[in-house]
Structures are given as structure tokens and as C-alpha cells.
Image (tube, helix red, strand yellow):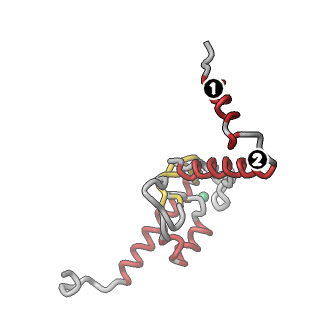
Amino acid sequence: MPSPLPAIVCAICFALPGCAPLSPENAELRRLEREIQVLEARLRQDPQPLGDWYPEYCTVHETRLRKDTVRILYGLPGEFVVQEWREARETQFPFAYTWGWGGCSFSNDSPKRVRVKFCPDCRTRRAEWVRDFEQRWLQQQPPATQASSH
Ligand SMILES: [Zn+2]
């Protein structure tokens, strides 16, 4: 037996002034409100859906990209701030995607993970590069002293 609920909802809807046939401006406003609701729901999705901007193959290694789900970082990651790292990322491992960027601001209900496509060769190269970068960075630091460890 079909539920009487849709008929009741329609009857209520047509009885309310706010649900009366819409002017073109109101209809456009409602359409925009629905579009915003869809976009807001998409922004809260966890994991975030896969973007449609990925090529099929890595532009550096010509390796076919694979799918993965990775954590989202918020704020300004070192990979963006350190010029040497940024340049290496662009030229040596553009599709490592070991994490996704969520922008600068976040709240408790911000998504934690995102679906990505990555190049396994980029991930290998990135791991090598980061290891080398950390070694060089540590060698540049003065040795820890008693005074600095209080
Ligand atoms: Zn690659």
C-alpha cells in the first residue's frame, strides 16, 4: 500500500503561503539555496570525494595514477612554505599526494580524509627527497647543549 505521506505533505505545502507558486526571482533564489546546500554537504563529506582534475598518468614518471584515501592537513604545510621543497614537489614528485590540503581554516566537523590519485614513483621519490632534506637540515643545526634543554 502506498504511503499517504507525500499527499499530506503536498496538501500542507499548497496551504502555506511560502510554498505557493514561485515568481521567477524566488524560484532562482530557491535553486541557488539548494545548490549551496549541496556544496555545503559536499564540503562536510568525509572522506572528501576524488577531484576530477587528475590526469591518467604522472607528468614526470609517466606512471598510471592509482587511487588512495589520505589524511587532510590544514594550515600551511612545510611543503608549501619551504621554497626548495615546493620546487622539488613541482618538478620531482607532483603526484605523491601522501596528504591532501584542506585550506587554512578548520573546525571540529571539518573532514579528516580525502580521496586522491597518486603516482607510486612520486611517493618513492618524495620519501627519498624528504629523508635527504631532513639529514641536511639536522646537519645545519648546532648540537644540543645543556643550557638549551631546560
Ligand atoms: Zn610520478
Pick the quarter of the image with the N terminus. Answer: top right
Residue 22, percent from left and from top: 77, 44
**Kind of residue sitting beneath label 1:** Ile
In this image, 75 relative to 25: left or right? left
In this image, 51 relative to 109: left or right? right
In this image, 90 relative to 31: left or right? left
For disc 1, the neighbor class at 10 Å (few under 14, some 14 to 19, many from 20) is few
The circle drawn on residue 27 is 2
In this image, 146 relative to 61: left or right? left
Residue 148, percent from left and from top: 23, 85
The residue indicated by pointer 1 is 8
Pick the quarter of the image with the C terminus. Answer: bottom left
Q: Are marks 2 and 1 in contact (CB under 8 Å)?
A: no
Q: Secondary structure at mark 1?
A: helix
Q: Which of disc 1 and disc 2 is earlier in sequence? A: 1
CA gap between label 2 and label 1 equals 23 Å
Is residue 9 in sight in this rendering?
yes
- Closest to the observer, 114 or 46: 46
Q: Residue at x 68, y 43 (%)?
A: 18
Q: Quadrant of ligand 1?
A: bottom right
Is residue 102 positioned above or below 150 on the image?
Answer: above
Tally of numbered tags: 2
Residue 96, percent from left and from top: 55, 59
Q: Secondary structure at mark 2?
A: helix
